[in-house]
Amino acid sequence: MAELATIARPYAEALSKAIGSDDAVALAGQLEALSAVAGNGQLRQFADSPKVTSAQVFELITGVARQALSPKVANLLTTVIENGRLVALPEIAAQFRALVNARSGVSDATIYSAFALDAGQLADTCATLEKRFGRKLNATVQVDDTLIGGIRVVVGDEVLDTSVKARLEQMKVALTH
């Protein structure tokens, strides 16, 4: 949703500028935990109630997240709540993560695999993918048994699909044309 991206950008940029030399990855983790809680429909309904104060919403979110917050992330959460922008918190977290990644030269990668990868396989795969994409990757793995075998990697808007499913689709197209 473009409107949420427009709303979220100034918040993410402000936090990015405010952190200075703080551990940006830790702050991104805190923000993502808060955004997961804020994404709950019942919580947003509670927050939208005129009978509820901003402090009550803040306490509920931080209580559910069960995570100690840095003062900067706490200030951001307070500002977002007071401005009625809680619905934008997941987008703020995503944009902040993108800014942190851009600053550190890292990209998020999602590896879809037909089977679970152990730590050694993941390390080898990441090393190969980092050479292929020319940058350091922060990889997460999701099992997708529809791939039959192989992997499908998504890094930003780039996709590398070496799955059996993709190869079968290529063969189907080649045979039907």
Image (tube, grey):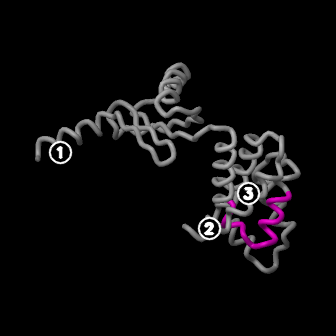
> Start and end of the magenta stretch?
75-89
What secondary structure is found at the residue carrying circle 2?
helix
Q: Residues within 10 Å of mark 3 (few under 14, many from 20)?
A: some
Q: Amino acid at mark 3?
A: Glu
Tell me where residue 174 appears, x and y as whole percent: 15, 41
Q: Of the numbered discs in the image, which one, if any, rests on residue 62? A: none
In terms of depth relative to the viewer, which is nearer, 9 or 84?
Answer: 9
Which residue matches tag 2?
Answer: 4
**Left or right, 150 with reference to 78:** left
Which residue matches tag 3?
Answer: 13
Question: Residue, x 62% and y 37% (percent of image)?
Answer: 106
Cβ atoms under marks 3 and 1 closer than 8 Å:
no
Question: Residue, x 46% and y 30% (percent of image)?
Answer: 132
Marks 2 and 1, the one that precedes in the sequence:
2
Q: Amino acid at mark 2?
A: Leu
Report the predominant secondary structure element of the magenta stretch: helix
Which residue matches tag 1?
Answer: 173
